[in-house]
Image: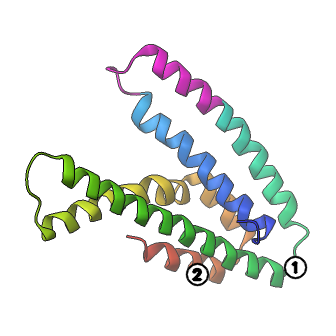
Amino acid sequence: MLGKSTWAVLALTLDIELFTQLHYRQSIDPDTELSELFKDVFLYHWKEESQHAILDELEWVRHDAGLTAEERGRAVDEFIELVAAVDGILRAQARADAGYFAAKCGRAVDEAEARAIEAAFLKAYRWQYIHSGAQHPQFGKVLSSLITESQGERIQAALATLQ
């Protein structure tokens, strides 16, 4: 992260802010069985993340205005690298969680089922921590306003490998 451009880090940061908000809206807010206190804690977290997202978006656009086309092209590549790094973390977490689940589920899990469990964890983690933010309408709106069509295609091609 430290060696990447500000543009790439701001892109990833906005993605994270938006998927955090989406997670609240899709899974916590509509759940009538959750504790009201639990929901309130996450509602106020959602409000805080909303403020961060607004500021991050403004900063990303401001920073982008000072870039050359070449610098922006490198920044797009670095954003793709950051997303790939997040995916590496998710792969390791899915492997660990699937192994733990298989060990604790109370029955034998054969190799094929263990691979299927790991794949299910990875798919869920990729949705939550990469795709839900990348597909957020506000993220798409801001990103597409900053990049060229070919840069957008590069990003989409990279995301398509993470299915």
Q: Main secondary structure of the magenta part?
A: helix
How crowded is the residue under tag 1: few (<14 C-alpha within 10 Å), some, or many (20+)?
few
Looking at the image, residue 110 sits to the left or right of residue 148; the answer is left
Q: Which quadrant of the structure image shows residue 30?
A: top left
Query: Residue furthest toward the top?
Result: 36
Looking at the image, residue 86 sits to the left or right of residue 76; the answer is left
Above/below status of 134 relative to 34: below
What residue type is disc 1 on?
A: Thr
Looking at the image, residue 27 sits to the left or right of residue 71; the answer is left
Q: Secondary structure at mark 2?
A: helix
Q: Position of residue 28 (x, y in %)?
A: 43, 30
Q: Which portion, as a residue range, is magenta? A: 30-47
Q: Which residue is mark 1?
A: 68
Query: Residue furthest toward the right?
Result: 66
State which tag comes first along the sequence, 2 or 1.
1
Residue name at image x 48 percent, y 15 percent = 37
Checking the image for residue 154, the label placed there is 2
Query: Residue furthest toward the front?
Result: 103
Q: Position of residue 10 (x, y in %)?
A: 74, 59
The question of residue 32 being in magenta is answered with yes
